[in-house]
Amino acid sequence: MDLHAWSHSCSAGFTLRGWHTPPSGKPVLHFLHGNGYCGRVYTPMLKLLAEDFDLWLCDVQGHGETDHGGRFHGWNRNAEMAVEAFSAGRSRFGDVPAFAVGHSFGGVLTSLILARHPELFQRAVLLDPVLFSRAMIGVMAVSDVVGLSRRNTMASKARSRRSQWPDREAAYAALHGRGMFRGWDEAAFDAYIQHALRETEKGVELCCRPSREADIFSSYPRRLWPSLSKITTPTLLLYGQRTFPFVAQSAVRWTAANPHASARIVPGGHCFMQELPADSAERVRAFLLLSGKRHSDYGTLVTQSAPTDLSTG
């Protein structure tokens, strides 16, 4: 897949970076990754989508090639900075349709963008977005006030994550088939080893510092549910059969209240697109380009919540 690097000096005072395919006249697809990852980690799925779309991959604050950027500026501000960068680079693709896809953390950022900028994208697909319930957000808000937010399980686990190895081979051996990588397609895991790690004098380290991953896990998007209610862009939410229970519950609640959104259950866990990249690419393509007309083209119609999966992203 032919990718060109881009950079944008954002309003928060640091540089956002990412990749785009050479403009070819195809519709452009804006992609945002999950927490701790970066755009190119999803190369197996994106390579297939590049057959029908030009790609714009944005690495958010502290991820991939983007600057760490000091303190974490929050979910909502990071969504707006992604819009800044895309708006600055959009013209190179010409007057073509634009679509949006995001996974997990990136799926929530994409939903915030859809709410504030309804004119930006024609259709969108959210891949297992971590749509916290209202009750969860209430608990997070109280924890934030009393100083307990950084002690939650996900944040604590992220802070203790190993971040350095002697070389990529050692990282591969330490991580392969374990934890959040269990069940991943080999090409997807290879993409993680290649693109989520950077070279250092001592070997390799995670591009996303564990502290930044923890910053995200110990915070939450402001005005999430009011934002979800404002979305008018046709949006498909795909979530894995083995994802977090709250994702399934929020998917049911949101799509019942917003006629512009629909949800489907697909095989796999929270990172189902890394487990089944070809299947995921076809579901995304079918919805964005309206090439399929059956529910089964996208996944099983939502009827109930799904059991849990401990994968993260």
Image: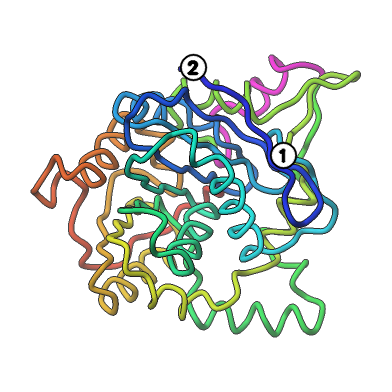
Helix, strand or loop at disc 1? Answer: loop
Left or right of 219 in this view: 159: right
What's the magenta bit mostly, secondary-structure-wise?
helix
- Residue 169 in percent (x, y) is at 69, 14
Helix, strand or loop at disc 2? Answer: loop
Quickly name the residue at label 1. 66
Residue 245, above or below 230: above
Q: Closest to the observer: 112 or 305?
A: 112
Q: Which region of the structure is painted magenta?
A: 166-180
Q: Residue at x 52, y 29 (%)?
A: 20
Left or right of 291 in this view: 113: right
Q: Can you name the residue that lies furthest to the left here?
A: 294
Task: Look at the image and say whether residue 179 sits in the magenta stretch.
Answer: yes
Quickly name the residue at label 2. 2
Left or right of 215 in this view: 89: left
Q: Residue at x 42, y 56 (%)?
A: 120
Going by the numbered disc 1, the residue's amino acid type is Thr
Rendered image quadrant of residue 88 = top right
Going by the numbered disc 2, the residue's amino acid type is Asp
Task: Look at the image and say whether residue 16 sits in the magenta stretch.
Answer: no
Left or right of 290 in this view: 186: right
